[in-house]
Every structure is written in C-alpha cells, then in structure tokens.
Image: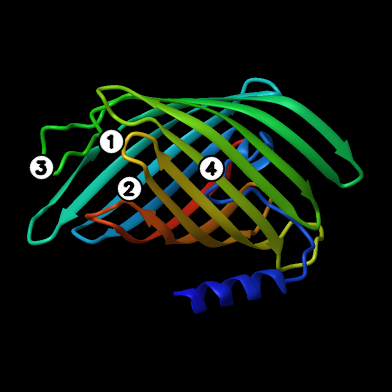
Amino acid sequence: MKIFIALILLLFFKTNVYGQGPPITVETPVMLGLEGNGIRTFGKFISKENVNVYVQSIAFPYNLTTKFQVGVIFPFKFITSKNSNTIGGFADMTVFAKYQLYKKDGKAKTFRILGFVKQTFSTGKTSSTPPIGSGISQTYVGIVMGKLSIKKGLYANFGYNITNNNSSDNFLYNFSAGAPLLSHKYPQRQLNTYLEFNGNYEFDSKVHSVFISPGLQFIPGSRILFETSFQIPIVQNNITTNKTNYMVSLGTRFLLN
C-alpha cells in the first residue's frame, strides 16, 4: 500500500500544469460554471469488510446571486450484506447553502473563501436490516477556501457536524490539489488530475479516518464534465469492525445556463 501511494504522489507532482476545473471530493469556492446552476449526479461504491454499499446521488445547485448559492441532494442507497439480499431505497436528503465571504482576483488567478452550511434530514428508512437511513439529523457548518489559476488549483474545507439522538458530533477536513494534463486552450477541452485527502474525526468514540483520493476529470466543453475518484484509507483509528476497504466514485456535471 505504501509503495502504491508513493507512486501516485510521484506521478502527480511530476505532471506539468496548465488549467483547472472544480475538485472532485472536496467542496469548491467557485459558484459559477459547472458548479453553478446545473445538475451533478455521481455514484459511489463503498467496499467494507462485511458489506458493500452503493449510493447514487443527484444534486441541484442554484446560484441566487454571484455570491449566494443554494441546493439540494437526493441520495439513493443500496446495501448488500454478505450472504443476504440487497436492500435499497431513498436515503437521507440534504439541503445546503454557500455564501462568498472573501474574493481577491488577479491576472488569471483568484483566491476565495466561502461559508458553507448544510442540513441533512432523516428521510431514509431505518426499519430495514441493514437500515437505509442514519436515523439522525445532521447540521454542518464550515469554511471553503480555494486558490485557483490556469496553472493549478489548491482547495481546502473544514467543518463541524452537529448530530442528535446521542450520536457523536464530528469534525471533517478535506484538501485537494489539481493539475491539468492538457494545455489551456479555446475551445475548452481539459483533462485534470487531482490528489485529495478526506478526513473525519468523531469526538465521542474518538474514531479517526483519513482517505487519500486520486482522481481524474475530463471536461470536453463548457457545459459538461466527467470525473472519477478512487479513495483508499490511510488512517482508520479505533475502528474495530467493518472497516472500509476502498471507495470508487464516478460522476457527471451538467451546466444548465
């Protein structure tokens, strides 16, 4: 595993950089373009020790202004336990809002900070075995930051997730660095690679998990992109059962206007 991660890092940082798109598993501070008024759909396959999970989500972001974005995410979850049938259905719905707090633009570059809140409702059924929904409501409050140019993209977001029903609150943190594989030109046609890190710390149980997430993104035009990410656990402290083996995601984003 260490050799595999080292090879990923070596290939990533040897790449020449010329352009940039939105990150894959990390929130973006740019509310226009492919992260503006549009549709994003992505499927994620999660391999665990005792169960496999597939989540297909459809997100609808909408820019109310150039500084304020709202949206909703509709997830559908399918769980297959070992030696059992697949249980599936509508999972926990999320609504979110982003507001631009700071922006500094330069020649072919920008730095932005956004406030980010989201509310997840307990809409998924919990009567099934295993349950589709979490059975809890969650309120997330965080910060999204990004420094972008046509040569590179650096992103980070941090947030606190508040839960109910005696569940543990948790702190989430994510980092992303993007490197284009094609020269920047018009009409737009980009192939971008990403190296991302996704962390989660649960306070009550002291469970800490970190994933390294290399990804690839293809932008054939100004209104659509395709992306994929492979997430590998590098830290799973205090997780005694049903650890995650890996996660694979595949998604598409459409710009409506």
Looking at the rendered structure, the kind of residue marked 3 is: Thr
Give the residue number, with chain letter if any, for mark 4: 173
Give the residue number, with chain letter if any, for mark 2: 55
Residue that appears at 33% across and 31% down: 168
Q: Are marks 1 and 2 in contact (CB under 8 Å)?
A: yes
Q: Are marks 3 and 4 in contact (CB under 8 Å)?
A: no
Mark 3 or mark 4, which has the lower sequence index?
A: 3
Looking at the rendered structure, the kind of residue marked 4 is: Tyr
Mark 1 or mark 4, which has the lower sequence index?
A: 1
Q: Quadrant of residue 242?
A: bottom left
Q: For the residue labelled by badge 4, is the local secondary structure a helix, a strand or a loop?
A: strand
Q: What is the x, y in percent for residue 154?
A: 70, 50
Between 256 and 69, the one lying in front of the other is: 69
Give the residue number, with chain letter if any, for mark 1: 91
Q: Are marks 4 and 2 in contact (CB under 8 Å)?
A: no
Mark 4 or mark 2, which has the lower sequence index?
A: 2
Mark 1 or mark 2, which has the lower sequence index?
A: 2
